Each structure stands twice: as C-alpha cells, then as structure tokens.
Image (cartoon, coloured by chain):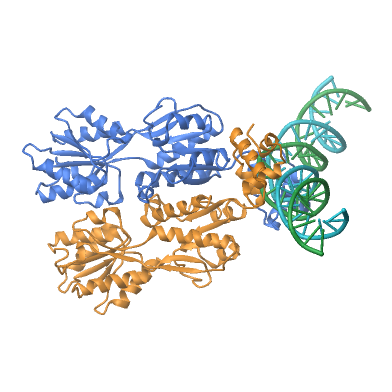
Chain colours: A orange, B blue, C cyan, D green
Amino acid sequence: MAVTIHDVAKLAGVNSSTVSRVINGKATITPDTKERVYAAMRKLDYHPNSLARSLASGLSGAIGVVVNARDAEAFSNVFFSRSLFAIEQAAQARGYQVIIANGAQSRGSAIENLMKEHKVDGLILPPTTVKPALMETIGDFPYVVLGTPDTLRSETCWVDNNNEQGAEMAVRHLQKQGYQRIAYLGGHQKRGFTKRRIRGYQNANNGTETILSTDGTAENAYTLAFDALKTADHPDAFVCNDNLAAFGLLKACKELHLPVPQEIGIVAFDNYPLAEYMDPPLTIVDIDTAMLGEQSVQLLFRRIENKVGNQQIMLSTNLVVRASSERKAK
Amino acid sequence: MAVTIHDVAKLAGVNSSTVSRVINGKATITPDTKERVYAAMRKLDYHPNSLARSLASGLSGAIGVVVNARDAEAFSNVFFSRSLFAIEQAAQARGYQVIIANGAQSRGSAIENLMKEHKVDGLILPPTTVKPALMETIGDFPYVVLGTPDTLRSETCWVDNNNEQGAEMAVRHLQKQGYQRIAYLGGHQKRGFTKRRIRGYQNANNGTETILSTDGTAENAYTLAFDALKTADHPDAFVCNDNLAAFGLLKACKELHLPVPQEIGIVAFDNYPLAEYMDPPLTIVDIDTAMLGEQSVQLLFRRIENKVGNQQIMLSTNLVVRASSERKAK
DNA sequence: CTCCATCGTGCAACCGATTGCACGAACTAT
DNA sequence: ATAGTTCGTGCAATCGGTTGCACGATGGAG
C-alpha cells in the first residue's frame, strides 16, 4: 500500500540499495543516478519508513525525556517546560524525535522500558532518578541528567545551572544595595537544588542566618514570612527559592505595610512570566533553560556517538535586576 | 548482542512464533509451554525490540502531540502542559509512547513527517493547524484536534471545552452577584477560543457591551483596565480571558482604590496555581484539562482502531467561586 | 598495452519481530 | 472404532529498510 524503497528503485531503474545510499548520502553515487532517484522519490511522494530504517540501523531516532510528575503542575513548572522546549528544538534540528515519559506513573520502570525495548537511543533524566540501582541497569546506555544528582555526582553525566553561584550572587547583590539581615525563604530542604541554593546563601551571607523552608506553596511562604516580619529585628531582605515564595512574601509585606524595596528587598529564583508584572517587579536569578536544554542534548548526542565519557556541565545563572531589590537609586 | 525472541525460543525449546504468541496472548497456548517461555524470558531478561515489533505489526506504538510554539512559554501554558500530562498518562496506560513535536520550528511539516514516516499511529493537533491543505494530506490518518478548529468544524475530529458556555456562566454569576456593567478583558480576537468566549459573554450580557482586547500580556490588560476604570460609568465587573489579564486588572483596581469584590467583580478563565493566592483569590472558569487529555486520547484510539468516524466532543467548564466575585455575603 | 586501484552499483543476508498456513495430536460425536 | 473437529505449535514469508561483499567498468601508472 505505502510506497517503499523498492518502488522507487524500480521507477529509477536501480537497485534498492542504491536508493538507500542516495538517501543516506554515505556513498559516492553518480550525479546522474542520484538525480533519477530523487526524481522517482518526488514522483511517488516517497517517505522512508522510519521503523524499518531503525530496525536495520539499530538506531531508533528518538531520545526520551523522563520526568517524575505526580500531578499536572510538574509539567507547567517553568524549569521543566522551558527546558523541554529547548530539548525538542535541539533534537529536531538533528532529525530526532522526543518521547516524554512520566516515571512516576508507570508500572515498572519507564526508563528500563524505553531503553531495553530500543525505543530511544538516549535519555534525559531528572536528578531524583539517579540511584545506584538505576545506574547499574542503565550500564553504558547514553543518558544525561538534567540537574545535579544528589549522589554519584562525579561518576554520572549531567548538565545543570549553578544554583550555589546564583544564590551567592543574589545575596551579594542585596548586600550591595545596603540590606543587612538577609533571609532565605522557600523550598523543600530535601530537594538537591534547594540545598545548593541554601549553601550559596550561606557562603555569601555574613549576618545571622535565617532559613525559612516551606512546602512549596505560596500560602506557606506567606505565613512564614508574615511571622518573621512581625518580629523586632526582622529580616530586611529575602532570597526566595521560587516565584511562588516571592508571591507569598509580597503579600505579607503589603499587609504589614513594609514597602518593597524601601524596607524589604527581594530576589527570587526562576523567571516566571508574571515576575516583571508583580508589584514591584521582581529581581530574578534567571536560569538559562534554553542553554540548559541545548547543552544536554548536545552532550547526549556526544554520548550516543560514543565520543565522550561521563561529563559534567555547569552553567552560570544571570541576575535580572528589577525594582524589588533596588533600594539605592541608580 | 541483545537477547532476541530466538534466544528465548531456543532456551524454552519452542519455535520463535510460539514465543511471539505467548507475548501477545492472542492464541491459546498450553499452560506448560507458556510457563517454560516465561521462565526463559525471565532468565534471559528478555525485552522485545519494539522497533522490530512495530515494523512487523505496522503499528508504531506511539502517538504524536503537535504544538505550534514560537517560544518556550507555549510549553508552560497551563492548557497545553496540563493536557499533555493527561495525554501522557492515558497513552501510557495503553502501552503507548508520546512524541512531542513543535510544528512551528520544523522545516517541512512536522505532521507530515510523523505521519508518513510511520513514526506515530495517530496525532493530537492544535486547532490552528486545521486548514484544507492539511486535511487533504492527512487523509484518513487518525487524528484528534485539541480545541475547536476555526474552519471545517463539522468535518473534523475534535475535543474541546465549551468556552461559550464558560463565559456565559461567568457573566450570569456576576449578574447574580449584583454586578451590572460587565466588560470582557483580554485575549487576541483572532484566536478562536477567545472569539467563542466573547460570544458567550455577548449571549448572557444584556447591558452595554465593552470588549477590551489585549495582546495577551498582563501589562496591556493593566493599561486598558486602568483607562476603562477612570471613566465615569466604568464597568463594575470583568470577565478575563486569562489569569494574566486578571493580574493586570487587579493592579489597576488597587491603584485606583477600587476594592475587589465590593466595587469591582472579577472572573477569569484558566485556573493558574497562583489564582487562589491572589489578593483577593480569583473566581475561575476552570477547564478540566485532565478530562480533555483523557478524552482526546480515548477518541484517538477509537479512530486508530477504526471504530468511529469523525466525532466532536464538547466538555463543559466549571465555575470555581472565590472572593473576587463574591459581593453578596453567602 | 597491460595491470591494478578505484569507483559505482547490484546481490543477498540481515535487523527482530508477526502471522497465514499446514500438520499432527487429542478430543468429540456417531 | 472411525470420521470430523478443534487445538497447539512449527515453518516460512514478510514488514522495509541497511550494509558487507563482489563484480564490472573506468582510469591512471608503468
């Protein structure tokens, strides 16, 4: 029913292997022959069957992006969704497809499934999956972790933004603006990236350390911030683990009539679209998700082509300064 | 190198076709044989090669989700990302993979590529792709549009939430709360779903019609709302096309000292995670993206199995009432 | 002018499954 | 006891490409 390589070969008056070679461009073919093949392909509207091609070549032509999502929110998470966009773009540029798989939902291991059934040639994994048992089953199958694994840091292959540096930068910026009692607000302490941000905060902070960890909701951040701001020598600035925490904090500041940035300075991680429309617009530690996605795909392909061993890539973050931290006039 | 069906067959002392039948469970096999085959599979840690399987069976075992995204924000859009989550879940439950493809980036048609190269068995498409030319090339290939196409509405296969009904419901709710001059704020008028929401607004609204269309940003909504609210007989309630518009509106209300919900009532489409933390929490026309994703996959599979022709499924929306529209005490 | 390397193309095996057909064994009906 | 089913399994073709090897033609060197 569908047009095959043999139909093209017959029309062009050559053998199917010649057509294959024309398509893949790996061998030298007489220009004349090549042209006849192309003409036949065009005439028949030929599209190679990628399944047959994969079976023969042993390459699926797809990479898998695994995410551990219990609920739909994990998919709208800006870090994941923006990275995914960049990953898709980079993969498409190489003629590769992107398969997404939710590791949290699947019975059996989604990773094992994709890998052992030859559905993908490589995997992009979340750091939470990195455990000795998985690394054993994954063997030397190509993968890249998007984020820093908590364990096996130096023996695995990953790409991440430098959370520690980002938090340090945030604190130093607030200090330069004259804030003195800087607190850290938001995030589960059990998440690796939060731990690293807190470490960066601690590195740069030379005042009293105040760390307010939340369950990740804006509501919780609001409550904690409200209580903290009611005390006598309350913090005069916050580094927020994410935009939601900053949102809760802003609400608390408003209710307590503490103007931002005059009385309270705020810097938050992750550049949500709303961040610049908040009141005041938020200063942000911006993660270059486009670069992160692009780099992880690049590294993954180098692994697929067996050109490199495990590598670690750390990208630095950028500070986007907006009103929420600008106490001093420019 | 990899374990094949033949290795399993040899170990179990049967023919490879028997192993195949055991795996697929389509034929009756002696319990004894079956057990021997399973034992061999376990012992060898056998995983069927999905590529070979697909080639032989003619089914790729994947569905494609196409999105037209110029920038990364389209991926974090709550409608897309939440639907995608549900789609992945529903596909995985059927043993199917989900391939995502950005139609806006690809040279050549991403849709044609996925379809003609047999990479997917069916497609979930965005409504903007529905054009006569595409429908011609797509032929009777299984697809479902997620959203209502602007054209070919009755000849195509789609699943959508009822935007018209949602907007009507929002207006009626505001009327019941005693608001009288209800305006519509936000959204490109060229987008189909915005048009339908506006139509719903018009159906229910019996006062003066005020439609403030924006470029989609919170900033623009803020400006338009601010200007509208400065006039003498300004609107006393708004239906917002999305949360960003509501965000801009809230800012305008605050600056003009118009308390919400006492002076101004607000209902917005799309339940962002932040909506309930806004000040005041927003009343929302909530779209059941989980159901939308699930239904679209279900319908797609019925099309793949050739059980049905083109169908249209319209899901109703729900009103989540919060403080922003509750002028009357409960 | 012969010899040999190089180049373009064909032949056929192979990738790893699925599946229609055939055949022998076991079972039912008469 | 015999004929006719039914059931479980094997054989071999097939899905649509890729690729190692072989072979004839061409071209340059000696």
Percent x, y for residue A277? 22, 54
Image position of A213 with respect to B253: above or below:
below
Extreme residue toward the bottom, this view: A206
Q: How many discs mark residues in the rendered view?
A: 0
Q: Nearer the viewer, residue B29 or A310?
A: A310
Image position of A265 with respect to B314: above or below:
below
At horizontal 43% and vertical 68% (from top left) the residue drawn is A314
Which image quadrant: the C terminus of chain A? bottom left
**Residue B31 visible, this orientation:** no
Q: Is residue B231 left or right of residue A177?
A: left
Which image quadrant: the N terminus of chain A? top right
At horizontal 35% and vertical 74% (from top left) the residue drawn is A199
Percent x, y for residue B219? 21, 49
Extreme residue toward the left, this view: B232
Find residue A16 and report its image quarter: top right
**Residue B311 visible, this orientation:** yes
Q: Is residue A104 left or right of residue B11?
A: left
Percent x, y for residue A213? 31, 67
Q: Is residue B132 left or right of residue A268?
A: right
Q: Nearer the viewer, residue B281 or D17?
A: D17
Q: Is residue A130 left or right of residue A174?
A: right
At horizontal 39% and vertical 59% (from top left) the residue drawn is A289
Percent x, y for residue A256? 14, 62
At horizontal 23% and vertical 32% (from top left) the residue drawn is B201
Find residue A216 and report its image quarter: bottom left
